[in-house]
Image (cartoon, rainbow, N blue to C red):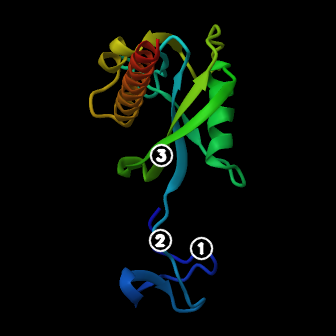
């Protein structure tokens, strides 16, 4: 949101230089700067133990591509609580662990989306009224169902890549441990 009038008194704002911030909308009457604001929201790649991600179709977003669980944070709610609430509301899953991945500016909607990996135990998806359909999709098939370059696509790609790195690290540790055990025997 970009301020033109003061939300406190209604006066038209002027521009005033505020330190290193540059020219900022300023209310001369209230003597307050009013920085541009954005809506805080979350987006979650909901994954299960079978290396699947829950992808949703919400026709008001796209009739052809899938999206991830996402929603607006409520006042007084942490980002983590918002993820748990949205995952439960939209697809009926209970989040077991959360991992922050990255923040994504979404200028078109004046939002900042906080991206998370939300791990759940696989259950049947229970959809809210705002979700037209959803399905568990294998990691290797997921990116093709999302709009390339979208925030959902970037998030799912990051989660898949991180999980691949973790799997490789575990295999390497196991190989080293086995080699050490073979040397001892």
Please report the residue visible at 69 percent of the width from the left and 34 percent of the height from the top. 85
Sequence-earlier tag: 2 or 3:
2
Q: Are marks 2 and 3 in contact (CB under 8 Å)?
A: no
Say if 125 sits above or below 102 in the image.
above
x, y (%) of residue 8?
Answer: 64, 77
Q: Are marks 1 and 2 in contact (CB under 8 Å)?
A: yes
x, y (%) of residue 181?
Answer: 46, 16
Crowd rating for badge 1 (residues with CA inside 10 Å; few <14, some 14–19, many 20+): few
Label 1: state its secondary structure. Answer: loop
Image quadrant assignment for residue 173: top left
Q: Which mark is residue 7?
A: 1
Q: As drawn, which residue projects farthest toward the left?
A: 148
Question: Left or right of 99: which side holds 77?
Answer: right
The residues bearing labels 2 and 3 have C-alpha atoms spaced at a distance of: 21 Å
Crowd rating for badge 3 (residues with CA inside 10 Å; few <14, some 14–19, many 20+): many
Residue labelled with disc 2: 3
The residues bearing labels 1 and 2 have C-alpha atoms spaced at a distance of: 8 Å
Q: Nearer the viewer, residue 163 or 100?
A: 163
Label 2: state its secondary structure. Answer: loop
């Amino acid at each position: 949101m970009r301020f033109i009038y003061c939300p406190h008194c209604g006066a038209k704002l002027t521009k005033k230089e505020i330190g290193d911030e540059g020219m900022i909308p300023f209310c001369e009457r209230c003597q307050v700067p009013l920085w541009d604001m954005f809506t805080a929201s979350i987006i979650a790649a909901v994954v299960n133990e079978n290396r699947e991600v829950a992808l949703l179709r919400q026709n008001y977003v796209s009739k052809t591509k899938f999206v991830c669980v996402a929603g607006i944070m409520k006042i007084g709610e942490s980002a983590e609580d918002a993820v748990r609430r949205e995952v439960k509301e939209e697809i009926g899953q209970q989040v077991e662990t959360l991992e922050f991945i990255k923040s994504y500016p979404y200028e078109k909607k004046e939002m900042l989306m906080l991206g998370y990996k939300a791990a759940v135990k696989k259950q049947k998806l229970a959809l809210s009224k705002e979700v037209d359909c959803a399905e568990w999709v294998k990691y290797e098939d997921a990116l093709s169902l999302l709009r390339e370059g979208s925030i959902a696509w970037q998030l799912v790609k990051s989660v898949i890549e991180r999980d691949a790195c973790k799997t490789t690290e575990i295999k390497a540790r196991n190989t080293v441990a086995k080699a050490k055990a073979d040397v001892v025997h």
